[in-house]
Amino acid sequence: MAKFFKKKSTRYAIPFLTLVIGGSFGLKEFAQIRYTFSKKEAFKPEEMKKLGVKKEVKSTGEVTLESEYEKIKAIDVDHWENKRGPRPWEADSLQKI
């Protein structure tokens, strides 16, 4: 029996196969948890009112391609200035300004 466990194929194959087969079962369980808890439904407005949550209702106008184009056309895209964001190593220099 000692010769069996000293073989290279046994020393490397058994842990590898255990990891691969055990990992597939473990992954299955984690995936099942994900799908079990992702099927939660959102609150309905009646339930939210019972809980005391006030929700503002936005007036939704009709959004068309033409109306969005008019908004974008009003923006000046030809004259702009490139503003660089702060780098992590420049944090101290921003406090001095």
Image: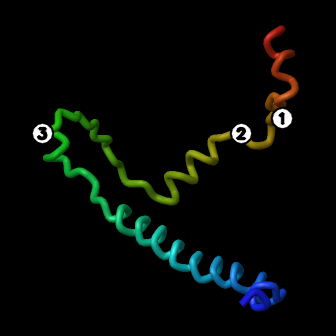
Q: Which numbered tag is attached to residue 82?
A: 1
Q: Looking at the picture, does residue 20 appear above or below residue 35? A: below
Specify the farthest residue to the front: 1
* Quarter of the image where one finds residue 85: top right
The type of residue carrying mark 2 is Asp
Q: CA–CA distance between discs 3 and 1?
A: 50 Å
* Quarter of the image where one finds residue 87: top right
Contact flag, marks 3 and 1 (Cβ < 8 Å): no
Q: Is residue 2 left or right of residue 89?
A: left
Task: Tell me the SS state at disc 1.
Answer: loop
The type of residue carrying mark 1 is Asn
Q: Residue at x 13, y 47 (%)?
A: 46
Task: Tell me the SS state at disc 2.
Answer: loop
Depth check, mark 1 against mark 2: the one in front is 1
Q: Which numbered tag is attached to residue 76?
A: 2
Q: CA–CA distance between discs 1 and 2?
A: 14 Å
Q: Is residue 95 left or right of residue 65?
A: right
User: Where does residue 8 sit, x and y in percent of width and height?
Assistant: 84, 86
Going from N to C along the chain, the mark reached first, 2 or 3, is 3
Q: Looking at the picture, does residue 88 appear above or below residue 38? A: above
User: Where does residue 84 sit, x and y in percent of width and height?
Assistant: 83, 32
